[in-house]
Amino acid sequence: MTNHDYKVLITTSGTGSRLGSFTKEKNKALVEINGRPSIAYLFDCYPKDVTIVITLGYLGNQVKDFLLSYFPERNFEFAVVDNYEGPGSSLGYSILQAKDYLQCPFIFQACDTIVVDPVSKPDKNWIGGYVTDWSKTDLILNQYRTHTVKNNKIIQLNEKGVSSFDSIHIGLDGICDYQSFWQALESIYNADKFNSSLSEVHVLEKMLKEGVDFEWIPFPIWLDTGNITALENTQKYLKNLN
């Protein structure tokens, strides 16, 4: 490893179907935002010498070749996902393929999540959540999982459509208790290997139920690149930021 005692996991193995024609011949992590592949924005939040683990699946060679060519100063490890589409595929399955590379505290960041604030080290368990003035946002709130928070601790991960909540789940989590994480993920996966909805959220829920504490880290700026409308809004925001 590097002089850091943690790693960062970024999953790029999915097909990015919600982006339509943008991902027909290109991996979703390489869709450009103002001339820069979206995954490049994620690296801005991390030290240059931290190890970044990348899951490779759909058009994975595109991702690997790009990263090795454009970020020669960074240390990458690549976990190949053999099943990234169809029965048995899921985000949870993709994450599981990176287990051997992540026998240490790590940060999970979905490749369609961009934040501009510094990302905390996983020296404790934490879950990142988007906070804003819900009365003024143009987000369709019922399409997101959300958090209930008390005393800066996550006490519940809510299903989509819950009307009362404290923040939106953005797919950015710090995992200090990594052994508990892998035990929980393997248990859930083995119970239903064909659950295509399995994600890191289910693992966090199980850990919470088992008494593992997660601190709440609110992010006032969260840029989603997972669907076409969100991608367009992200392009506008980052263009104005520069």
Image (cartoon, rainbow, N blue to C red):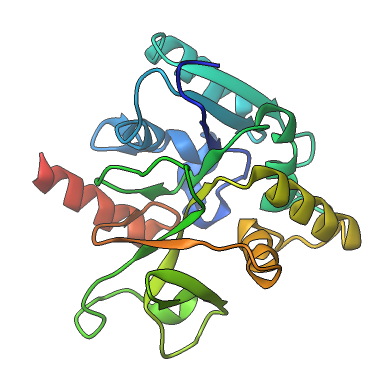
Q: Within the image, what quadrant is residue 197 found in?
A: bottom right
Q: Left or right? Give the position of 172 relative to 25.
A: left
Q: Identify whether 166 is placed above or below 125.
A: below
Which residue is at 34% across, 25% downward? 47
Which residue is at 42% across, 15% downward? 74
- Residue 134, image x, y percentages: 26, 81
- Residue 128, image x, y percentages: 41, 58
Quadrant including the C terminus: top left
Which residue is at 31% across, 36% downward? 45
Instruction: Tell me, yes or no, if residue 226 can be seen here.
Output: yes
Which residue is at 41% across, 38% downward? 31
Q: Within the image, what quadrant is residue 78 found in?
A: top right
Q: How many numbered badges does the structure rendering display?
A: 0
- In the depicted view, which residue is nearer to us: 148 or 61? 148
Quadrant including the N terminus: top right
- In the depicted view, which residue is nearer to us: 138 or 160? 160
Instruction: Tell me, yes or no, if residue 145 can be seen here.
Output: no
Q: Identify whether 102 is placed above or below 153.
A: above
Residue sitting farthest toward the bottom = 163
- Residue 67, image x, y percentages: 46, 19
Q: Left or right? Give the position of 12 relative to 225.
A: right
Q: Identify whether 123 is placed above or below 233.
A: above
Q: Within the image, what quadrant is residue 54 found in?
A: top right
- In the depicted view, which residue is nearer to us: 27 or 186? 186
- Residue 191, image x, y percentages: 89, 62
